[in-house]
Image: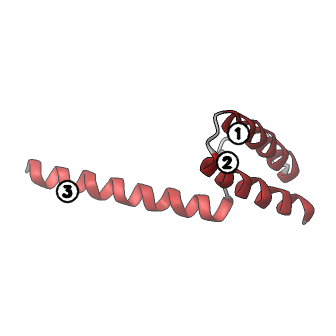
Amino acid sequence: MDNLLKEYDDYIDLVSELVFKRIIEKYGDIYPLNFTDDQEEILVGELAKLTTILEMLKEKEQYEKCAEVQKRINKIQEKLKNL
């Protein structure tokens, strides 16, 4: 019985991860809890957060992480241009 419960828990974890990945792919790296429905406000807020993180990573000389954050910033800037 314990084995079955562990397998079930493992399955739930796997499904949860897959669902979360799909949400991120569809909606981007924007927090699901928003106080506004205005897409521009959400994107500008995310852009501000990522810009701050980028500067912190530069100070720590974590350039690989900087590249990933910069990619996210570029995606958001492109979305803002298309609004």
Q: Which residue is mark 2?
A: 66
Q: Can residue 2 be spotted in the picture?
A: yes
- Tag 1, which secondary structure? helix
Q: Which residue is mark 3?
A: 7
Question: Type of residue at label 2?
Answer: Cys
- Nearer the observer, 53 or 79: 53
Q: Categorize mark 3 by other alpha carbons within 10 Å: few (<14), some (14-19), many (20+).
A: few
Q: Can residue 29 be spotted in the picture?
A: no
Residue 48 rendering spot, x and y as whole percentages: 81, 40
- Tag 2, which secondary structure? helix
Residue at 64%, 34% in the rendered image:
60
The answer to whether marks 1 and 3 mark residues whose Cβ atoms lie closer than 8 Å is: no
- Nearer the observer, 33 or 69: 69
Tell me, what colour scheme is on the image? secondary structure
Residue 9 rendering spot, x and y as whole percentages: 26, 51
Residue at 71%, 58% in the rendered image:
71
Q: Which residue is mark 1?
A: 58
- Nearer the observer, 23 or 52: 52
- Tag 3, which secondary structure? helix
Relative to 22, residue 70 above or below:
above
Among numbered discs 1 and 3, the one appearing first in the sequence: 3
Question: Type of residue at label 3?
Answer: Glu
Residue at 67%, 59% in the rendered image:
27
Q: Which mark is residue 82?
A: none
Question: Type of residue at label 1?
Answer: Lys
